[in-house]
Amino acid sequence: MTSFSHSQPATKVPAIVLSFMLALFAITINTQAQVADKTEDIAPINAPFEMEQLDRSSIPDRTYDIRDFGAVPMSEDEDFKNTGAFHRAIETAAADGGGRILVPKGKWFTGPIHLKSNLNLHLADGAEIVFSEDKQDYLPVVRQRHEGVEAYNYSPMIYAYKVNNVSITGKGVLNAQGDHWWEWFEEHGAPPRASATKVPLSRRDWGKGAGHEGMRPSFVVFWKSEDILIEDITLNDSPMWNLHMIYSKRIIIRGVTINSLQAPNGDGVVLDSSSEVLVEYNHFETGDDAVVLKSGLNEEALEINIPTENVVVRNFEARKVRTGSGGVVFGSETSGGIRNVYVHNALFDGSDRGIRFKTERGRGNVVENIYIHDVIMRNITYQAINFNTFYTGPEATGPSPLLRNISIKDVEIDGVPIAIELVGLPEKWIENITLENITVKNSEQGARITRVKNMTMKNVEIHSEQRAMIVEDAYELFLDSVTLEDQVDEKPLLFTGRHTGAIFTDDFPLDQMEFSDGLTEEIVMEAPAEQAW
């Protein structure tokens, strides 16, 4: 075993004392891992950037019970579709200036629901909306963004096009019955989205009616809408993405439960070229990313150039998130840019990844000013913290994206193959990264840093089986109070790559470092006085 810590040498602890300390530590972790209870009031937003304070919009105090418009529960008629009843209630409420569309307790079978301004679709406790499995019910096509590319396609289950002041609330359930969409997708395969961005929407072989099948709609879509509230509902078995916000502003998503473990691409909350967003007190068990920020794909999105920005995600948990995905994710569609995001107080348990940045050549633009802190990660399948700018491989071409100005602090990681992995492009390194107060235990591999410039690691403790930290082609790396421990007969810190240089530290000894590729200890120097640890 090789290790280095800046602290004093450890003394042997009696077994009974050690057992007590470990038990106490486990209790502490379990307590910290609990997401705070949801409050009725929306707490102020204190982000490290300027952002609007968000609160619920005011809906007119009028109620429109769908039963008064001909709705029949499934207990009375399993096959009766309430699409018309929902439509009539919405049209009447909209004509009156808005109000609450009440879905009473019971199961209600329907086709898609299209919302209008100044409405609250309210699901009473015990209410469940069950959506049709007949794809013809989701025609005519509507405009949407499918995996970062605009298309005309089957309607989402709930669709809101250019609306204002709209809510979906209540303790009820939205059930998409998505398995027939999943089977259809497996039959036709993924559509060729990258080639679609190269031609105008009107001339694309893309989407329903344009020669391509297999494109599933998202569950709930808001398109170019403002002042949106989604609160307390449960979503089950989405065809694809669950809550998809496109080109929209002033959004609150809170207290929502999303269950989509069986859904291919069953992302939870998708913020797509949208701004001024609060996401809080949500529970995710998803078949893809729990919370993901995107801004469109390749040529089309570079031209549209609408970023996702000014976003706060707080007090949430993601469990068993699968298919290689993460608890909070940036990308892979980043062509409109992503900036000003504040994520804090989260638990990721049993997820494939934890904090993830993914993009590649062709997507261009910048992901920047990201602040993440107070995160607990357990039993992660791949990487806990992952930056990947080769998302589909090195063969991708086009404008290179830039990841910069990202701060990750106060993170506990327990159980992971690779704890920390950052990989920048040869022509565009990742820049200005801070990792502070990070604790890693039960890791197979520790930190792997490749093509990163100006990175600070402060109060970072890594315990791994293999080499604790490998740095390849990194420049201006600041190490302060870094503890590395592994279980192999090697020095815990390896520097490699001919472009590696300017390693600053005042407390990590040279005899715990190994150098390769012609590097020598001359690349290591004392931290400059102006460096703000």
Image (tube, helix red, strand yellow):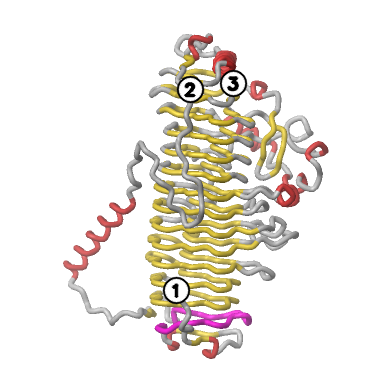
At label 1, the amino acid type is: Ala
Residue toward you, 124 or 385: 124
Q: Is residue 93 above or below residue 308?
A: above
Question: In terms of secondary structure, where does tag 3 sit?
Answer: loop
Residue 111 tag number: 3
What amino acid type should be assigned to the residue bearing mark 3? Gly
Check if residue 492 falls in the magenta segment. Answer: yes
For disc 1, the marked residue is 468
Q: Is residue 146 above or below residue 127?
A: below
Stretch of the chain drawn in magenta? 491-508
**Residue 211 against residue 370 in the figure, above or below:** above
Going by the image, does 509 lie left or right of 387?
left
Q: CA distance from mark 3 to mark 2?
A: 26 Å
Residue type at mark 2: give it. Pro
User: Mark 2: which secondary structure?
Assistant: loop
Badge 3: few (under 14), some or many (20 or more) residues near its Cα, within 10 Å? many
Q: Residue at x 52, y 18 (%)?
A: 109
In the rendered image, the vertical position of residue 496 relative to residue 234, given as above or below: below
